[in-house]
Image (spheres, helix red, strand yellow):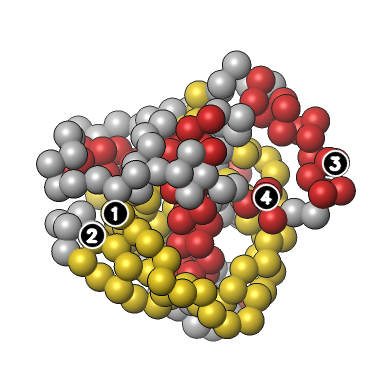
Amino acid sequence: MRREAKNAADSGFSNTFAGKELNFTSMILPIVAYGDPVLRTVAADITPDYPGLTKLIEDMWETMYASNGVGLAAPQINRNIRLFVIDSEQIFNNQDDEDKGMYPDEPGHRLVFINAHIVALDGKEWPYNEGCLSIPKIREDVMRPSQVTIAWVDENFTPHTASFNGITGRIIQHEYDHIEGKLFIDYLKPLKRKLLKGKLDDITKGKIKVDYKMAFPR
Ligand SMILES: [Zn+2]
């Protein structure tokens, strides 16, 4: 999921993102664009001996921050596995004073989710204007339940079960959809979807200007 850029300077790349030092051996991976079948496959669980997992997670952090993402799922970097990373701390760090206290999950979370499975979705549905790194320059309001309860293992394969709400719960649901082969545009009404068809086709064909590295299906 991508956050909205507040100004031009906000969309630049640097070696530190939100004050977090990155490992210099990590690299930016191309983000798979809408239309690639990998975004439509249900991803598989992995075991701790998955080759190069530590480096892969580092690369996903770097790729996510370089594209102003607040979440990134493995299918978006062409890996059909149940792995995603989220950093909602960025949203709160970039928030205007007047928006403080708007979400119950302040100051956010920075987490790695492996082999995640949703246990329950609860609470009132609320709209949020979502964007996706695989579907650049399209943002639409999506209704989702306010709370997600999820079971997963972290980067050390330590198991967790926890509930998340606010912006963190929103990002987790968006990224979880990616490992289930779903996209935020699937929630739009058929007419809205139809109106976006031309734009979506252009993304698939690579007929779009983006400020981060992408891989187009054709
Ligand atoms: Zn996405």
Mark 4 vs 1, N-terminal side: 1
Q: Categorize mark 1 by other alpha carbons within 10 Å: few (<14), some (14-19), many (20+).
A: many
Q: Earlier in the sequence, mark 2 or mark 4?
A: 2
Looking at the rendered structure, which numbered label has been put on residue 154? Answer: 2
Q: Is residue 167 toward the left or the right of residue 202 in the image?
A: left
Disc 3 residue type (three-letter): Leu
Looking at the rendering, in which quadrant would you find the C terminus?
top right
Q: Is mark 2 within 8 Å of ligand 1?
A: no
In the figure, residue 138 lies in which quadrant? top right
Q: Residue at x 50, y 82 (%)?
A: 104
**One can see residue 28 in this view:** yes
How far across and how far down the image is residue 137, in percent? 68, 40
Specify few, some or many for label 3: CA neighbours under 10 Å numbering under 14, 14-19, or 20 or more.
few
Q: Badge 4, how many Cα within 10 Å: few under 14, some, many 20+?
A: few
Labels 1 & 2 near each other (Cβ < 8 A) = yes
Q: CA distance from mark 1 to mark 2?
A: 6 Å
Name the residue at 25% across, 49% down: 21
Residue that mark 1 sits on: 114
